[in-house]
Image: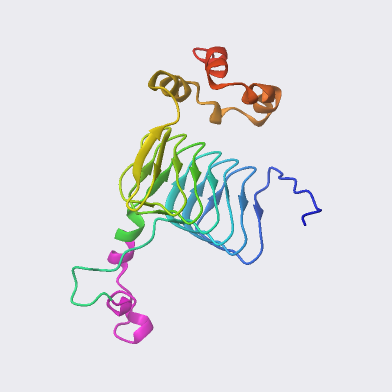
């Protein structure tokens, strides 16, 4: 039973037993327990659940990442005679004085992009180089091998689109409003509007700056 309330502050909140390398965490962010995050930019208000593994990715603002999600899994060299990492982690096995830096740089260049206000379900895998559009939902256990359009819901292995969350015109207007770039103060001031139905929200804010 959870008795202690968690209050997220502007400073990133990092839970125990995490390894975070070459990563920038935005304001009001949280990293769940036992996470490994490498070469990632993490937008304001985004968070991960437990046991997540993120590499070489750009995560937008307000992204909701459930436990055991893998984003940007690295590849082995399938074009070489062996898949084993001794061909690029050469120093580890005593085969060379330096590792294959070109191979690692190529890995790091295959960025995965996660849009703003997205929901990545439990155990989902987002492959390297994929782009998840704003407002999209990735179902639990999905393996995403192709780009996902904004405000789409995808699921399955490989992931396929099930439906759009809203009508095309509503999606277009939400993308124009870009509420995820609002300041903390503006969101707080207009908090009750986020409890409105989608049509009322869009009607109130579309075309306004």
Residue at the (65%, 49%) spot, across then down = 12
Range of residues picked out in magenta: 84-105
In the rendered image, residue 85, in percent from the top left (x then y), is placed at 32, 76
Q: Position of residue 196 (x, y in %)?
A: 62, 21
Drawn side of residue 21 relative to residue 13, left or right = left
- Tell me the residue at 66%/31% (across/down): 184
Would residue 11 be found to the left or right of residue 70 on screen? Answer: right
98 is within the stretch colored magenta: yes
Residue 179 against residue 104 in the figure, above or below: above
| Residue 153 drawn at (x, y percent) | 42, 38
Look at the image and tell me in which quarter the C terminus lies: top right
57 relative to 15 in the view: left or right: left
Q: Is residue 78 above or below residue 91?
A: above
Residue sitting at the far right:
3
Does the magenta run of residues contain 82? Answer: no
Q: Quadrant of residue 16?
A: bottom right
* Viewer-nearest residue: 102 or 148: 148
User: Which quarter of the rendering shows the N terminus?
Assistant: bottom right
Residue visible at 33% across and 54% down in the picture: 109
Q: In the rendered view, tell whether residue 74 sits above or below residue 130.
A: below
Which residue occupies the foreground of this view, 134 or 25? 134
Please indicate whether residue 59 sits to the left or right of residue 26 in the image: left
């Amino acid at each position: 039973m959870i008795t202690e309330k968690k209050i997220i502050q502007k400073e990133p909140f990092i839970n125990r037993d995490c390894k975070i390398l070459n990563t920038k965490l935005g304001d009001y962010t949280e990293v769940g327990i036992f996470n490994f995050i490498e070469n990632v930019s993490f937008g304001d208000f985004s968070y991960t659940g437990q046991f997540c593994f993120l590499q070489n990715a750009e995560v937008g603002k307000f992204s909701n990442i459930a436990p055991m999600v893998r984003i940007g899994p690295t590849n082995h060299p399938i074009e070489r005679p062996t898949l084993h990492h001794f061909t690029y982690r050469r120093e580890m096995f005593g085969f060379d004085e330096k590792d294959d830096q070109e191979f690692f740089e190529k890995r790091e260049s295959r960025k995965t992009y996660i849009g703003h206000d997205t929901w990545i379900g439990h155990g989902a895998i987002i492959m390297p180089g994929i782009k998840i559009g704003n407002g999209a939902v990735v179902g639990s256990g999905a393996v995403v091998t192709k780009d996902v359009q904004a405000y789409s819901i995808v699921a399955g292995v490989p992931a396929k689109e099930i439906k759009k969350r809203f009508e095309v015109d509503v999606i277009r207007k939400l993308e124009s409003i870009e509420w995820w770039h609002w300041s903390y103060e503006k969101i707080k001031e207009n908090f009750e509007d986020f409890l409105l139905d989608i049509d009322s929200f869009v009607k109130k804010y579309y075309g306004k700056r």
